[in-house]
Every structure is written in C-alpha cells, then in structure tokens.
Image (cartoon, rainbow, N blue to C red):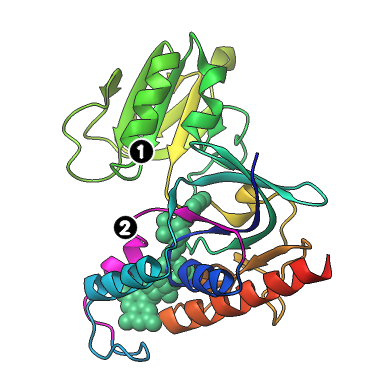
Amino acid sequence: MERYDIAIIGTGPAGLEAAITAKLRNKNILLLGNEELSTKIDSAHEIKNYLGLPNVSGSDMRSAFAGHLKAMDISITTDRAAAIYAMGDFFAIQGHAENYEASTVILATGVSAEKPFPGEKENLGRGVSYCATCDASLYRGKSAIVVGYSAKEETEAAFLAEIADKVYYLPVYDGCDTAPAGTELITGVKPTAIEKAEGGLMALKYDNGETAEANGIFILRENIAPTDLVPGLEIKDGHVVTDRKMATNLAGLFACGDITGTPYQYAKAAGEGNVAALSAVSFLSGK
Ligand SMILES: Cc1cc2nc3c(=O)[nH]c(=O)nc-3n(C[C@H](O)[C@H](O)[C@H](O)COP(=O)(O)OP(=O)(O)OC[C@H]3O[C@@H](n4cnc5c(N)ncnc54)[C@H](O)[C@@H]3O)c2cc1C
C-alpha cells in the first residue's frame, strides 16, 4: 500500500490550505474529502472578512478555492475517513471506500451541529455503526436501519442492502422520495433515541412514540466526533486540543480549523491549515 507523507482529512478551508502548503513543500499528500469542498463554504450568502475576496459569495469562494487546487494540480480523493489509528511509525486510515496509510495526518474535519442521539455513543460498536461499508459484512443475513443525513449516504445504504437480509432507510433530509436500491424507505418520522432491545436487537425510537427494531443501526453523518474518529485523541470542551504548532497529543497528528475551537472563521481555518502543514513537514524532517 502506498504510504503518503501527509494525509489531510477534510476539504474545507483548513484542509485545502494545508494541502496547498504541503504540496508547495513537495510532500506526497492524500487529500480526503469531497468535490463540493465544504457545505459551510457553499451555504454562506455573502462573506466580507476573507482577505483578497471582498463581498464574495460562498459559491464564488468555493470556485476560487477549487481553481487554486486545479492550478496546483492537487486532486481530491473522494472518500470519508471512518477511523484513524496511530500505529507507531505511521497512521492507518480506514476510509468508507478504501484504506490508506500516511506518515502524518492533518485533521480538518470541521464541527457538526448535530448532537448524538441518547443511547448512540453507549452502543457504538455494539449495534450502532457510523460506516456501512466498513461494517456491512457483520450484517450478512441480518437486518439494519440506516439513518442518512444527506443524499450521499444513499449509496452506502444500497451497498449494505447487497449484503444484509433487510435494510430500512430513514432519510433525515428533504427530497428523498425513492428508497436506495434494495432498501425500504421509512418516512414521516424522526429518530429520537437508540436502545438495546430483546434478543440482541437494537431499537430506534421515533418522535411519534413508535419503535423499530433491527440487528444494527447505522448513523451516517458527514461529521463524526473526533474521539470516535481517532482513538486516544485529547479533547477539551468538544474540540481537539492543540499547541501553537497545531500538534495534538498524538505524535505526527495535527489538527486545524473549526475542529480546534472558536472562532469559527474561514481565515482562522486557513491560517491553522498553513501552520499544521508546515508542522507536519518539520515532523517528517525530524524523523
Ligand atoms: C452559513 C454560514 C456562513 C458563514 N459565514 C462566514 C463568514 O462570513 N466568515 C467567516 O469567516 N466564516 C463564516 N462561516 C464559518 C466557516 O464556514 C467555517 O469557520 C469554516 O468553513 C471552517 O473551515 P474548516 O475547514 O475547519 O471546516 P469545514 O468548512 O466544516 O470543512 C470540513 C470538511 O471536512 C469534511 N469531512 C468531515 N468529516 C470527514 C471525514 N471523516 N473524512 C473526510 N472528510 C470529512 C467535510 O465534508 C468538509 O468538507 C460561516 C459558516 C456558515 C455555516
């Protein structure tokens, strides 16, 4: 397997700036994220505080960022990290589509407004999963409920349905009228909590008071908590703890952008991305 110098997780301003800086320093990089870059760039109506781009719309800012990547021949690997493990001399990154290895990692996955359901964290890895592709094989001949937070999750649900006996798909976003291939659509309810049920099953509670049961419940969101993504990572008040070099408590793993704390701003995210990449370069030189 190819071992990258620096794996950058996230394609918001923090990850993109880290990628540009690392590429300028001739590092072999993996930039993991999505072609749309970040919904937090696109959703901004008018941005007035980003240097060099006065009164820019979110979509124009996105085009400017995408153009910069293109000009520097930086490509995005469209995948999502499901788990990152410190292996001593390198990091093993479990993606939804593939697995990767890198000598250093820069975490730039932003923050999520969505809170976990009661019972979600307690049952993670014990009937609750965040990655259908990674855990599908555990559900051969079994049933699962997939809670999808965006249309991107439909492909994962369809993949799970190829392996599991029965898959229900519950979209918590607008516009999903057709069930992903092989699944049965659940509509008109919102999930509220997760519990263990009789016979090794999991129960998903709905806002109408009803409950559905299955062997497993998949919660597919864009962001997962940094502690679920990277075992052993130090967190304080919901943010990754870093020093001024954007180094975390795990040697070789750096973090930047919203994930390290407020203020949540493009310029702060990009600035920290720059520092994180330079710190990763120094770390590699010192090895
Ligand atoms: C509506 C709105 C308006 C805003 N207006 C302004 C403004 O005017 N000025 C300002 O300075 N700031 C503004 N902000 C804040 C700004 O958007 C954020 O501070 C900034 O986007 C943070 O950048 P980031 O790179 O840290 O994270 P994000 O932009 O959130 O990017 C994180 C990226 O990581 C990806 N990701 C997440 N998990 C994974 C994973 N496991 N594997 C791979 N990729 C992953 C996501 O898909 C995303 O691409 C606004 C925010 C919003 C929502």
Q: Position of residue 276 (x, y in %)?
A: 63, 73
Does the stretch in magenta take in 230?
A: no
Under circle 2, the secondary element is: loop
Question: Circle 1 is placed at which residue position?
Answer: 153
Q: 215 or 119, which lies in front?
A: 215
Residue under the point 55% across and 15% down = 198
Nearer the N terminus, badge 1 or badge 2?
Answer: 2
Q: For residue 187, which quarter of the picture? A: top left
Q: For residue 67, which quarter of the picture? A: bottom left
177 over 44 or under it: above or below: above
Q: 121 or 260, which lies in front?
A: 260
Q: Position of residue 31 (x, y in %)?
A: 50, 57
Q: Residues within 10 Å of mark 1 (few under 14, many from 20)?
A: many
Q: Position of residue 261 (x, y in %)?
A: 56, 74
Q: Is mark 2 within 8 Å of ligand 1?
A: yes
Q: Quadrant of the C terminus?
A: bottom right
Question: Circle 2 is placed at which residue position?
Answer: 36
Q: Quadrant of the N terminus?
A: top right
Q: Cα distance, mark 1 to mark 2?
A: 15 Å
Name the amino acid, label 1: Glu
Name the amino acid, label 2: Glu
Q: Is mark 1 within 8 Å of ligand 1?
A: no
- Residue 84 appears left or right of 168: right
The span picked out in magenta is 27-47
Report if the CB atoms under discs 1 and 2 are less than 8 Å apart.
Answer: no
| The quarter of the picture showing ligand 1 | bottom left
- Residue 185 appears left or right of 92: left
- Residue 182 appears left or right of 121: left
